Image: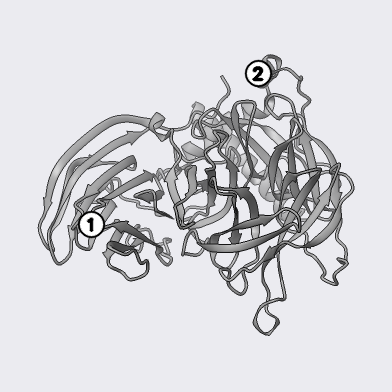
Amino acid sequence: MKIRLLFVLFLASSLSAFAQGFMMPTVTGPSKAEKFSFAADESTQMEQLRSNSMLQWFRQNRQAMAALDELDHRPVYHFTSPEKQLNDPNGLCFWNGRWHLFYQAYPTADPRVHWGHAVSDDMYNWKDLPLALYPDEERSCFSGATTVADGRVVAVYNGMGVGNMFATASDPLLLNWDKVGYIAPSIANDGLSYSLFDPCVWKNGDFYYALSGGAIPAGPAGTRLCNGYLFRSRDLKTWEYVHPFIQDDWFSAVGDDGGCPYFLPIGKDGKYMLLHFSHRRGAKYLIGNYDTREQVFHVTGGAQINEGPARPGGTHAPSAFPLPDGSGEVVALYNVKPLEIIPGTNVECFTLPQVLSLDGQDNLLIRPFDGYQTFRKGRKALSDIVVPANKEVQLKGISGDAMELDLQFDVDTPNFEIKVLADPKQREYTALTFYRDAGMVSLRGGNSWRMILDHTHGSLSEKFVPRTPEIADFACAKDEPLKVKIFIDKSIVEVFVNDKAWVMLRTYPILKESTGVFVKAFGNGTVVRSAEAWQMGGIDYSIQ
């Protein structure tokens, strides 16, 4: 009876949201979503949250959406929205000993973009909080970022119809936000009509600096290239345009637009990274030197984070923040687009958090942020699994659709393939294929690899339309074994290899028995030296 009631509530709210979102597409004025005022001390804030009406609705709605998902595709340990649609992550930051994640939310009471909010001690066990930023004079609160400076958190976002807007909060749980200023559209003093697009913000010396993503006509035949428009202010209220920020960029491509930029120090050698998103090509990064006198970014390196398109089922916008431990590393996560085969059930979510760092040649290293172990519930281990040439071997006893799988292969392993979410007859499976000496990455005295994640056979659903595979190239030392870490979460396959490469893709098996794992070696046999698997629990989003 309870599930049925929740289901009715969910359908009613969805129909209401549908009516508001499609019958009134030009909603203006202050948000109709409920707003709250919170105390200034943490203990009172926690008491207020336990009885908060919005959080109670979030709990009910999460239960209703889970009950609606008959095919069990909703991720359990990747962050999802408490209300329907989820878009860009925004303003990831570390404040008062906790991680705060903001995101584009579409509340039932008002279909425009707000900033949703969640908090975590470990970047994995997220707790829902009430909405943080609401439309007021702006029509929507789109993408943006945060920085911590002067004893407060400063947020910047694109306020549709107004400009790039700034808000601050300094209370323990970042529940009380004040809007303090904005950058209005204008013609820049260098003749460029600057765009006010996805922004980020940081403090350098006496000034706050804000970077608005975009492109300038500096490419071949006047085509547009990725750049960013720089602004500065002493007080967050009065802003002046400075100039285009990026110089010497030979790593971006024509048409890249610098979406969702995050400009951050990385490493311990004074390097900076501009992590961003190209609406044509996916997530990207630039590495270089920040000239604080001239206030320009001289690019010395860069590449794609992922090689496939964002839509459908791929990696979308990033959010990032420096680790607070002084290591020079950066933590980041991305939005993951769905491949909906049943509307309303296969939601957008976020990737697992990952740590970004640099090797000695300014190449980006990627590994999962530590803490995913909190979801482990049971362990299964195998060793020395012989895989004959051109034969396929099932990993007996290892299966699941919410699982972490760690595999280690011999250093001389040939090309090979791992199939996950596979049924016994392999009518459905998602394939991860490794090609040795692919020639895409050079390493003297080592091995180059190309990794391809392909869901072409991922679902038997008539509504499933596969997309191009995800690809990542990486290099290993000659004596370095391959260590493959695969996170499976209902409709997600997310892979890290040797802390050097990462791929992610959505997939939607519909057979209950599509949970198996198979390994095949091509040309020559191989040995899986170790295989460890854990069943994974899910996030409890409620404030206790």
Local SS, label 1: loop
Q: Residue at x 27, y 63 (%)?
A: 445
- Asked if the residue at tag 1 contacts the one at tag 2, i.e. Cβ–Cβ closer than 8 Å, the answer is no
Q: Residue at x 42, y 45 (%)?
A: 367
Q: Which residue is mark 1?
A: 426
Label 2 Cα neighbours within 10 Å, binned few <14 / some 14-19 / many ≥20: some
Looking at the picture, does residue 463 appear above or below residue 368?
A: below
Label 1 Cα neighbours within 10 Å, binned few <14 / some 14-19 / many ≥20: some
Local SS, label 2: helix
Left or right: 112 as drawn, with respect to 99:
right
Give how far across and how far down residue 523 sits, in percent.
14, 67
Residue kind at label 1, given as amino acid type? Gln
Q: Which residue is mark 2?
A: 46
Asked whether the viewer can see residue 29, the reply is no
Left or right: 402 as drawn, with respect to 92:
left
Asked whether the viewer can see residue 118, the reply is yes
